[in-house]
Amino acid sequence: MTKQSRHLFETVEGLVAASAEAIRPAKRMSVSEAAEEYRYLNNPGAYVGPWLNSMTPYLVEPMDVLASWKFTGMAFAGPAQCGKTDMALNWIGHSVMCDPADIMLIQTSQTTARDFSMRRIDRLHRHSTEVGSRLLNTRQADNTFDKTYRSGMLLSLSWPTINELSGKPIPRLWLTDYDRMSQDVDGEGSPFFLARKRATTFRSFGMCAVESSPGFVVDNPKWVRTSKHEAPPTQGILGIYNQGDRRRWQWQCVGCHSWFEPDFELLNWPDTEDFMEAAEMATLKCPHCEIDYSHDPMDGMPGKHILNQSGVWVPDGCVINSEGVITGTPPRTTIASFWLKGVAAAFSDWKTLVFNYLSAERDYAKTGNEENLKTTVNTDQGKAYTPKSMSSDRVPEELKNRARDKGFKTIPLNVRFLIATIDVQKNRFVVQVHGITSQKDIAIIDRFDVRKSQREDEVAGGKLWVNPGAYPEDWKILSEEVLLKTYPLGDGSGRQMGIKQVLCDSGGREGVTANAYNFYRWLRSGDGDDNVEDEQGEYMWQPGLAGRFMLLKGSSLRTAPRVSVSYPDSQRKDRSAGARGEVPVLFINTNLVKDSLDHMLNRKEPGGRIEFPDWLDDNFYIELTVEVKDLRKGWTNPNRFRNESWDLLAYCIAGTLTLTPPLEHISFDDPPSWAEEWDMNDLVFDPEIQDKPFTGELQKSSKLADLAKNLA
């Protein structure tokens, strides 16, 4: 016995009292009743006082299921701000005060477990004094990840690793924020599956509970519902919900007395450009009689809080009549599962839900980025998200049907600047030139291959094909063939426009990356005194070309930003790449950028669409349809068909994000000089007056002697 233990039992009475706590029979009190009896909240500025079930009446039934012998699992899917995590604290309080048994609380990571211990568990002990008084008063009994109570009950805080979730028989387990956990723990299965096995020894006395807002996208948007309450097929919390008896929270309409599930789809708001005004006027319409409800009571009609007081959980396969009587046969299962939508969440309001949704929709329309939209659907609405890219199947003929006569490799009237992109193949450079319009559409201007090098074929004569992986000098022809290429304006004036930016893939076959880096260095510095004429042929160079050219590479991280610039250093990795930390490389999150491209290809109206000229061949359109979205792997090319049109357009979108300012932030009422109307555009020139834009800097090396002769 330790010194601290001896101190606890200085009297026989103390020893008897402590022993009695361990053998005390369970109090006949439900989890929700114990919460009101023993739980005290101290959140200054929000609420200070005892726990009130009336604040979150939809939590009563899920909490009480935790002490049920009928179920060994409980799943609660719900939005943020609904109080779902508090159920775990109330369950701990009930276990401590009424029915002691070991509990393991599983957080998403060790860091979040530590934070939960300090912010939630320690405060539970501090403010709910009766619960806190049951904690053993020893250093070993109260540490960050383990709490021991006078009854002998042990509370453990853990995180999902195979060591933590195996070999430990524990009667009660709680997994929080489940959809932010890996769904395969060290290759052994899902956290919920592994955690449930810890409680199997205790049979009907065991319970494994899980809560989360949905975080995974719908696996199959074309699924057919087999029962009224079934959730879409997806991983995570809704996948577990579907294994249970699938209870939905329902309100009763005060007008027609019918019951309905409060859902974001039932909200209405005025069509106005002022999103805050629209959100403030949001109402919810009964789907049966179309009576409107406001978030707060108004004109004698109840608001959300009052409707929640009489709300009822209805299992799948059951119906509820106007008197509130539930009939039917729920699914036979050992999991009680609940799905609450964001409209009913106690600590959020409809104004916020609508404003966040409208803002995310606007962001998606401008950028094609779905992340904000997914977040608000998941966390505000409490629903699974279906990516836009999964909503339709694209075919080449549909895209080709949108093509219009825009002139042959001519710049349409509304194009303000050009972006060229290059894909590196074994024996060719594939080039695509895009025009960015004043409405932020992308118009295809040109598509061609650079095949022949400046190297002589001494056997057959003529020029050899390019070999980007073997010959660094083959890259230099891109200067004249792409960077310094110009295109005629579509107004018949004879004027031309130069290319604002060129982006080139830097990966591929062996040698490509090193040669790509060397090409960038050549663009930046030239060949010094030898740049007038190269021994392999003539190459065009000018100061400032490196500023118009950027290498790019796909990021390996699915959580990476859409674009970011880095300076690879081969001293740390991949020494064969020839990187020395001075070549900028644009890393792109290909999944996010291709999501944006997919959105633009779906759009038919101006303001973020792709425009096609009528001279493109069928292969161009086929290449736009070969990639598919895999929910786990992202965009893939399963049949390995040619997809250059698709990739080069994705590179173009990435390029628009690197401009200063990025395209999505450009106002064409006051644009940069390179995006001005043609008469004021820095990149527009008249070839009768000047050779190229910025004539003083643009010179072909082979013309320097002629220029000197003319000046003599």
Image (cartoon, rainbow, N blue to C red):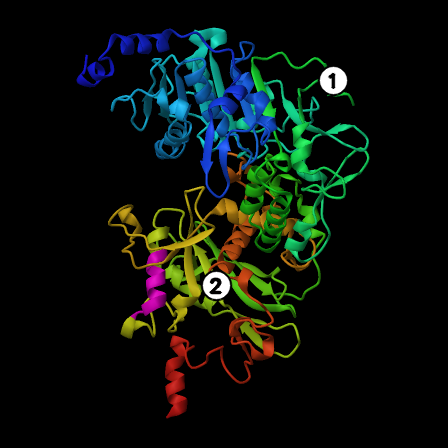
Side (left or right) of 463 relative to 471: right
Residue 411 showing in the rendered view: no
Residue at x-position 30% and y-position 69%: 527
Picture coordinates of residue 98, whole percent (x, y): 45, 14
The disc, 1 or 2, on the residue closer to the chain's N-terminal end is 1
Residue 299 showing in the rendered view: yes
Quadrant position of residue 616? bottom right
Side (left or right) of 294 relative to 645: right
Q: Which mark is residue 205?
A: none
Picture coordinates of residue 646, whole percent (x, y): 56, 49
| Depth order, front residue of 525/369 | 369
Secondary structure of the residue carrying tag 2 is loop
Residue 517 among those drawn in magenta: yes
Q: Magenta stretch mostly in which secondary structure?
A: helix
Circles 1 and 2, Cβ within 8 Å, touching? The answer is no
Picture coordinates of residue 321, whole percent (x, y): 77, 21
Residue at x-position 38% and y-position 89%: 709
Picture coordinates of residue 539, whole percent (x, y): 39, 69
Q: Which mark is residue 659?
A: 2
Quadrant location of the N terminus in the rendered image: top left
Residue found farthest to the bottom:
712
Q: Amino acid at mark 2?
A: Leu
**Which residue is tagged 1?**
325
| Depth order, front residue of 700/493 | 493
